[in-house]
Image: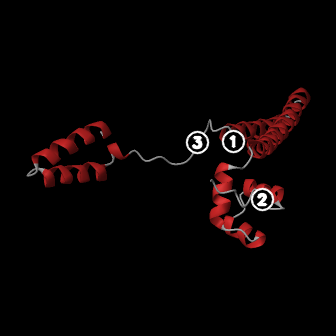
Amino acid sequence: MPQVCTVCRHPLLAAINQALVAGTALRNIAAQQGLSSTALFRHRNEHIPAALTQAASNEELRQALDVLQQLKAINGAALTVLRDARAAGEGDLALKAIDRIHRQIELQAKLLGELDDRPQIVLVQSPEWLTLRGRIVQALAPYREAAVALGEVLGDVG
């Protein structure tokens, strides 16, 4: 006969589920509620209602939409300043508004994952990689099968 989940039988099940969905450490919940971390782990993986998980993702979506609304409001204000500055012939203020709009677009692109300004290293073209590759191939020359296998892999890499 299968064992009944000790967490499901706990009088504070709703609070435990909420803590699990929120990402509270299992050991902390276990200590507070007198349960084992293993039981909590099993319960989290097998019994947490999908609705609780969905509720957490809905909150993340709400926060993301709030950030988007704030970005839109700032963009709208900057566009209004730009329009008014151009109409009044205030070139310096118009340039400042353009700069703000540019930065807002850049921030929006980063948040949406459309812009990644992290440095990227292309190993295939670096002199260090080419030197290392040559040394590896040279070291494997006496081992024909290994050299061929490595050559096939390195052919895919560059």
Corner quadrant of residue 29: bottom right
Q: Which mark is residue 9?
A: 2
Earlier sequence position, callout 1 versus callout 2: 2
| Residue 91 image position (x, y, % from top left) | 82, 34
Residue at left offset 30%, top offset 37%: 156
Q: Secondary structure at mark 2?
A: loop
> Mark 3 to mark 2: distance in Å?
48 Å
Q: Are marks 3 and 2 in contact (CB under 8 Å)?
A: no
Residue lying at the far top of the rendered structure? 87
| Residue 3 image position (x, y, % from top left) | 65, 57
Between 69 and 45, the one nearer to me in the picture:
45
Q: Secondary structure at mark 3?
A: loop
Between 76 and 30, the one nearer to me in the picture:
30
Q: Which mark is residue 111?
A: 1
Left/right of residue 6 with respect to residue 74 in the rendered view: left
Earlier sequence position, callout 3 versus callout 2: 2
Q: Residues within 10 Å of mark 3 (few under 14, many from 20)?
A: few
